[in-house]
Image (tube, rainbow, N blue to C red):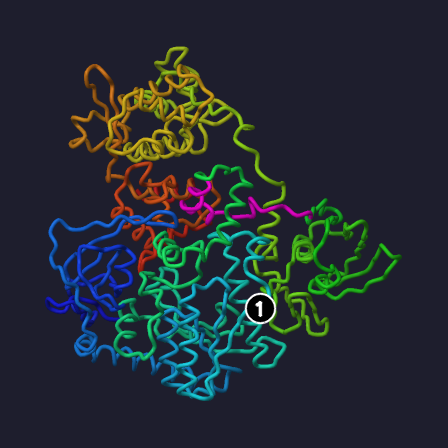
Amino acid sequence: MYKVIWYKKTNLLLLVDSNLNQDEELNSPRVVYSDELKLLGIDKYKFPIDNKPVCWCIDRKYYYAGQFIFGVKGGDLYHEPKIIYPDEFPVYNLKPIDIAELRKINNDKLFSLQNEAMDFINEQYDYYSKRVDAFAVAFSGGKDSQVTLDLVARVIPPDKYKVYYTDTGMEIPCTYETVEETKNYYKGIYPNFDFIYCDSDTEVIEQWKSYGPPSRMNRWCCKVRKTALFTRKLKDTLNTKKQPKCVVFEGVRAEESTRREGYDRVGEGVKHVNLINCRPIFNWSNTEIYIYMLCMSNIQLNKAYTFGLTRVGCNICPFASSWSEFIIHKVYPDITKPYINVIEEMAKNIGVTSKSKVDEYISSGNWKKNAGGRGLIVDETRMDILKKDPNYESIITKPKQDWKIWLTTVGQYTLNKVDSLNYNGEIKIYDDIMKFNVSEREQKLKVSMSGTSGKLSLTSLLNKALTKTAYCERCGVCEAECPTGALKIRKNEITIDPMQCVHCHKCYEVNSYGCIVAARRRVSEGGISMSSSTTKSSGVDRYSTFGLKEDWVRALVDMEDEWFIEYHGLGNKMIPAAINWFRDSGIVDSKEKKLSEFGHLFCDIFRKDEYLAWQIMWINLAFNSPIVNCYVNDLMNNVNYNKAGILTLLQYRYPGLKENTLSNPIGAIFNMFEHTPFGCSQEMADFEDYSIKMGTYAVENRERLIKKIGTDNISRISITYMLYYLAELSNSYEYSVSDFYERKVMGPKLIFNYPLDKFHNVLRSLTESGYLTADLLGGLDNIHLNKKFSAISILKEMVSKI
């Protein structure tokens, strides 16, 4: 709500009106305690031994009284961050922040924040008092929920709301301490204060083993370990079968992410049909939260923040930053071990066998991108749909649940038991009365239904009910979606009251499969992946020694499909090399000698903007050409390499290939950089604007050298295309900036040596344009791509606006 600036030349922050034009505005500083400085091993400054707030941090740069005192770079589960000190030290003795003075200078603004939030809470309480069954506060132990509870407790009588803490089973110890301290504090003030724990009767590690680790594509943990537990406990505490209508005060803030910025302050039915989410501190900044906690609240800040965490959640999370992983591992070195063991087993099951490679798989965050259940130990349960037209048939092997229970959710049915193994019956689905047969034999279930031709909606419902029959492990997420209370799921039992079930099929809406577990298990069917030794040769020598040339590209663009008749200017040995370069660029069809769909688009782009076309072509080669892929991944930036140096790197990649074979593509790439805008001479690198500069070349002592420099002169169209091209190849639409700049995922850093600050600017621009969503505030660096776009469709759309 307010801007933040340094207060004069002190170590204090001042909240100022947001409509003031303050050039010195700060980007959401967070408070830093002595414990964080100790943890980082800061030894250039003197600071309090006891845990006091002493300085401020903005984007991993630390400041005291407005002056930079050090920065940190890197750091993850297995690696310490690098501490970067200034050339000159502006101060030696770091004194604690003067809390009394901090409150004094911000008193008016803090009361304004507090009173506005309390007025909002009071308005919602008055409005909904006769419209809902209950009021609740969602408490996590994090700072935002601490402030929200503090504000609600100042407004609403303690016997008129309940506080719900959902224990995922993966919290860090200091969060449990904060929860207990908070509960005891409020119970000491308000005897009627009701603090309720929502926990599971299933150990979370068992679900990790069964479902697989949560991932950015399949974040089952939030639904299974939060939503399901909360909605179940809400029913139990209010002693009702159906989902009660409830106002939930929560600590969601717009600044946390671009996605949350689009939320309303009051959301009715946005998460669940019977819940109304009210967000008192929705417009507060991170800094305002910290200052409020320091100056206005009697509740102690969760110690996790004093260690340096920017967000408090589970001890391991697919959306956690490398920084969070470093802090948690440093403070609690053994807490993630059971979960790491599960990830290690999955890594081995997908063919990552050596200890160093497994560690790299984990520290790089690759486990977070596992969209399905790849790497899970495959059990014998499976579902096979044999046909849908003209009749439906499917077989379930070793179903985990009773098919009769889940069939109840599809529609009303009658059932006849023919004998001990066979059933037949009729079921009403929408306006159709359908006949079906079920056969049970040797742990196999065969289901058939006649007359399903063209009835896609009907067979979709049947598929989901049978998918639940096959894979359901009673996680409870379906129960949270049931509006009537017909469905009840406990650890050892599922019951559906046919008198209450209205066949709304809400219990299928948990995902496209209709079942949380099936989303992992069905993808994993087929077993452990083959090792690389069973795959074909890489084709690294497909160009001989012929490098791609600018003249070849211009001729192809000018002649298009007629180029394949004349092969303008090419000798017989050059033709297959040129075609392979163009195929790896995506320009020529992979099977026929003609332009691909992308090739026609490329020609149009080349005629509009040649430099953009070369950028797009380089992206495709970086992903598809073995030698270019090795070049961008394995060679360091700003280092001169001769042919022998590159040969050594190739031998690591292709240990089974002879030196002569590997020498050919090295010659080809040297030649390509000399004859295309992918490279330029090192003498002209500072003056050349048309070159991508990924292969600057020189000759010293009659030896050819090559160096990756890169450029910041890259179109945002190229960056966007590159991200969506990667998404299609990996089937992952969730990334982080850290993936590209710290974990060596193919992206702007590897492909173009593109500067981080420029990439941030491009992401902000693309977010504003609606091409993706980037969360870059409050220590976040998540990138959410939109699945409605393909690489070629977004390229067409953006190029059309040139």
Q: Is residue 612 left or right of residue 7?
A: right
Query: Whole-percent x and y of residue 433?
Result: 77, 61
Q: Is residue 433 visible?
A: yes
For the magenta stretch, what is the residue range?
358-380
Quarter of the figure with residue 410: bottom right
At mark 1, the secondary structure is: helix
| Residue shown at 23% from the left, 26% from the top | 680
Q: Nearer the viewer, residue 396 or 337?
A: 337
Quadrant of image for the N terminus = bottom left
Vertical placement of 540 versus 324: above or below?
A: above
Number of marks? 1
Vertical placement of 170 versus 521: above or below?
A: below
Vertical placement of 550 versus 168: above or below?
A: above
Q: Estimate how packed mark 1 is, as few (under 14), some (14 to 19) or many (20 or more) residues with alpha carbons within 10 Å.
A: many
Based on the picture, tell me whether residue 368 belongs to the magenta stretch: yes
Name which residue type carries label 1: Ala
Quarter of the figure with residue 597: top left
Query: Whole-percent x and y of residue 144?
Result: 36, 70
Q: Nearer the viewer, residue 731 or 148?
A: 148
| Residue shown at 25% from the left, 59% from the top | 37
Based on the picture, tell me whether residue 723 belongs to the magenta stretch: no
Q: Is residue 418 left or right of residue 138?
A: right
| Residue shown at 82% from the left, 60% from the top | 425
Residue found at the very far right of the displayed protein: 419
| Residue shown at 20% from the left, 80% from the top | 108
Quadrant of image for the C terminus = top left
Q: Is residue 23 visible?
A: no
- Mark 1 lies on residue: 480
Query: Whole-percent x and y of residue 258?
Result: 35, 59
Quarter of the figure with residue 800: top left
